[in-house]
Amino acid sequence: MEGKYRPAALDWSSVAVVTTQADINREIEELRGGGGPQPRLEYPPYRSSVLRHPTKDKQLVDPEGVELWAPCFGPADVAATEADLTIQHAGEPIGERIVVTGRVIDGEGRPVRHQLVEIWQANAAGRYWHQGDQHPAPNDPNFTGAGRCLTDGAGVYSFQTIKPGAYPWRNHLNAWRPAHIHFSLFGTDFTQRLVTQMYFPGDPLFDLDPIYQSITDAKARELLVASFDHGVTTPEYRLGYRWDIVLSGTHRTPLEES
Amino acid sequence: MSFAPGQTVGPFFHLGLPFDGGNLLVPAGHPEGVRLHGRVLDGAGDPVPDALIELWQADANGRVPRATGSIHRDGYTFTGWGRAQTDGAGHYWFSTLIPGATAVGKRPFFAVTVFARGLTDRLFTRAYLPSDEPDALLDGLEPAARATLITTREERGLLFDIHLQGEGETVFLSYPRQAR
């Protein structure tokens, strides 16, 4: 787990019949605009999806019983300090300190109050604190890269963290993921569950990334990009990013709500 | 309203999502506890060792739990929610209670959410208890599709394999107020 520099660990012979970025770009281009506002489950440019996407249409069903409710989380589950990813170790993590904040609202525009938000991410060098990540970039002994918080009474979450770096992966030759933070969100009913990724504005890797592009609708993709916000930037201390999240609609009637 | 699109959990979700005791809705060995378990399989029938399953369910009396404390369990409070990652053999398991019917005439099920590397968005499904009772969803499905949503009773629990693709592909669900 502890980071040792591993030079020359990349063995490109393990990449099946070298697929280049140009090949992937062509595939992305062919599928552009071919899906709805959610990612396509079948999206071959993301190679790991090929055997893992359902081939049959989803079955539309009216939610009932537990599906009309979401699990509850509270202060017993999450300590306030877990929202600060920069204080989990003895020293200060390396990198650009940032705050990421925003509101979680449901499909009717109502705040999702006192609900769990979880995040995980790479460090400033683009390295995950995970055995599976063998990218030869340094681990940071002062940065694990995982946090949790509860939204407040207005549906607002806030994390202090380090801006993650881009990192290479082996989808194809010379594949790089744009910098992102993974977000896990719950709504007020089961059907609103969302796991997604938040990106940073203006990333040059957007057009090249088959995960981001698995959402083939440009407007929908942009919903995952945070905006720099000088208003939440703290003088002499940290830059601020704002990212509001709209979950899907709820199914409970006001009567059931009371 | 434009709903935020989902994205894959990727290969490193172990860093942020699983937690100790996540799969223990009741302590293992609880007198009324059962093991709900199974494998997650891909379109080639191979195990998916980097999937994450979430479980959400009523208690034994059919009540929907409203208690907090899933992440730091006290061993007594039934919160109805859990999370389990698959192991190297694609196997997941929960220690939990058999859910009761949430209303008269409703057939009990576990609500299940599936995440995995390579899966661009989460999938929803239901794991029903084995029985012959009528059900609005099950009764509208072909027998082979219906069978994918029904757990198999075992001596100490219930088996529920999840086939992401191919032979015996699990029926996955969408709900009316989601973006499609």
Image: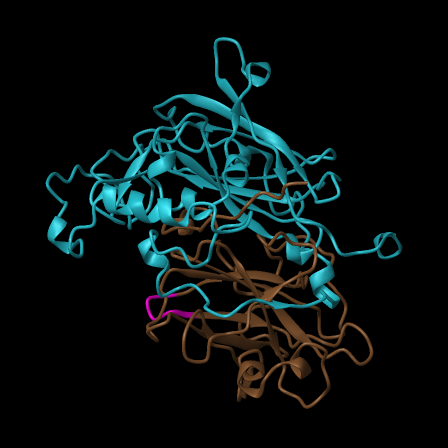
Chain colours: A cyan, B brown
Which residue is depicted at the point 36% across and 46% down? A28
Q: Is residue A160 left or right of residue B165?
A: right
Q: Is residue A178 visible?
A: no
Which residue is depicted at the point 54% across and 68% down? A57
Residue lying furthest front: A30
Q: Say above or below: A207 vs B38.
A: above
The image position of residue B21, as x and y in percent, is 51, 60
User: Which residue occupies the foreground of this view, B87 or B32?
Assistant: B87
Q: Is residue A78 left or right of residue A85?
A: right
Residue lying furthest top: A236
User: Which residue occupies the foreground of this view, B38 or A215?
Assistant: A215
**Quadrant of res A202:** top left
**Quadrant of res A251:** bottom right
Q: Say above or below: A56 vs A41.
A: below
Q: Is residue B128 visible?
A: yes
User: Which residue occupies the foreground of this view, A148 or A203?
Assistant: A203
Helix, strand or loop for the magenta stretch, by majority: loop
Q: Say above or below: A55 vs A230.
A: below
The image position of residue A189, as x and y in percent, is 70, 55
The image position of residue B15, as x and y in percent, is 41, 47
The image position of residue B105, as x and y in percent, is 80, 81
Which residue is depicted at the point 75% across and 40% down? A110
Region of the chain picked out in magenta, as a range: B87-91
Q: Is residue A54 left or right of residue A65?
A: left
Which residue is depicted at the point 41% across and 75% down? B166
Q: Say above or below: B110 vs A125.
A: below
Q: Does the magenta-highlighted stretch encompass residue A150?
A: no
Q: Is residue B13 left or right of residue A253?
A: left
